[in-house]
Image: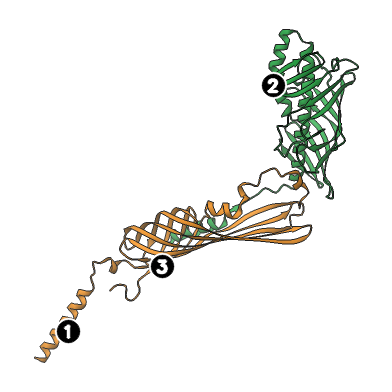
Chain colours: A green, B orange
Amino acid sequence: MKRTLLLIAITSFVCSGCFWNKEHKPTQRGKDIFDCWHHSTNTVVADAALAFDLNCWIVASDSMRQVIENEAFPSTRIRTNDSLTYHLYVNGELEYLINTNGTLLTDDNALWSITVNHDSDNDNVMAFYISNSRESHTFNISNSDNNHWHISGDSTNIGGVLDWEMYIPNYGRHPLAYYDFEISGSGTFVQLNNATDVTLQYVIASPLVNYPSDHVTNSWNQLYNNNWFHGKAEITAKKPHAEDQNVTATMEGSQVKITFKNITETYFL
Amino acid sequence: MKKSLSTFILLSILCITNAQIDTNSWKHTLPRHDMQVSIGAPSLFSSIIAVGGFFNNNYAPSPDEWFDNYTYKGMIFTTGSLSLAYKYRITKWFWIGATASYTGFFENDKDQITDQIVGGNRCHVISIMPSIRFSWLNKPIVTIYSGLGVGAILFYNKYEEKANDIPMETTETYICPGFQLTAVGVHVGKKWYGHFEIGCGIQGFINVGFGYKFNSKNSKK
């Protein structure tokens, strides 16, 4: 009987104790802001990569084009009427319009314009992106110097700005995902297809470094989900009449150190 | 003669009295009234209703929320499902009665930086249910049974927060139907007993407690 009563007492204690512990992460908001920035940055990189991959495709032989299509454009059809403007259809939809102005990206005077029509992230809160309109946006890539390319865009009507320098030391005849590359610069992301006035202003304080993986199967997907091998960004989330939210993110492969309100914590990506 | 008559009357009375007490009847061996106090793990149902978001706290906040008060939800504490029940045995195996139960959930909002409490959620879940019980093993010390209660549940929720340093309070109350199905329950003990129940419903999956079985002065007749 004593044992029974003891068992009842213990079980009662356990039942009444029912705690659900929730993790306290003082930098969680900083991580949320970083996630938005990271997602948006990768989206720009992946879209820019299409231009570099298209450049490879243009200069490639017919047999090499087949390889590049399999790796970089697995569900994309490339169409052109004049070899100046290329239409990229993804699953039958015109998603990219790339105007080469008759140049290759490796030409000194290269100036490409990339218009992105897809808005697959409409309902995603992470969909910060430079945008000229709520449904499509355009950015430019120009050859600045010795394997450096300037990636820029300016949508003054809603405040999106893109001012990047991309360095690809060994850029050649393969899709971008095969190469080391670095990105530096700054910009402002605005929210695509959303009425909020929140913007993300950032400066890349230490270049974002990407090393290629050993096995490239789909370069666009790989870059879209990329974790930077090195890099540091200072990000400020802004909203009218509200206090700025400042975040410093230091990336090391699958980890990121987030500093928010003078507290630093490490997250696994 | 007088003495013989007196003896006869006395014996007759004793016989009548003995005839009225049927020592083989369950009414003699098993008590009719049963009061019990229990505590159970809070049911999933009341937990979801009461704490609402507690499966839902890992969502990514929208950009607008980045500028809200910077708080986090602290631990959720629950009293467990506390209940008080009374049952009356109508036949050897069938009981009727009622159960009242209470479950409290308490959760604090804390400042992410200072860890100070700045608000919180207090939810009280009260149910009252008429109930029946079928006891299918009836021994003086051990009773095994199943049961069902159907009734009403009252939810009262009070949420306190600070918006721009101004304290705000929101309350909500609503009533909905509820039940408690006891698949198997065991009493062990004679008058005072401990019990253990497995079931589902507002009182939770597992219930333990103690109770007291008794007969009123007239119930053996």
Q: Which mark is residue B184?
A: none
Residue wearing tag 2: A218
Instruction: Give the class, few, some or many, for how many residues have Cα within 10 Å of label 3's Cα (few <14, many ≥20).
Output: some
Q: Which chain letter goes with mark 3?
A: B
In the image shown, does B21 or A130 lie closer to the viewer?
A: A130
Report how far apart the C-alphas of labels 2 and 3 lie in the structure: 71 Å
Give a yes or no on whether discs 2 and 3 share a subunit.
Answer: no
Task: Residue at 61% x, 52% y: name it.
Answer: B52
The outermost residue toward the left is B1
Left or right? Give the position of A240 relative to B141. right
From the image, which quarter does the N terminus of chain A lie in? bottom left
* Viewer can see residue A215: no
Report how far apart the C-alphas of labels 1 and 2 lie in the structure: 107 Å
Q: Is residue B163 above or below residue A146?
A: below
Q: Are marks 1 and 2 in contact (CB under 8 Å)?
A: no
SS for dot 3: strand
Residue A242: where, in percent of width, then height?
83, 50
Residue B201: where, in percent of width, then height?
48, 54
Report how far apart the C-alphas of labels 1 and 3 lie in the structure: 38 Å
Residue wearing tag 1: B10
Give a yes or no on whether discs 1 and 2 share a subunit.
Answer: no
From the image, which quarter does the C terminus of chain A lie in? top right
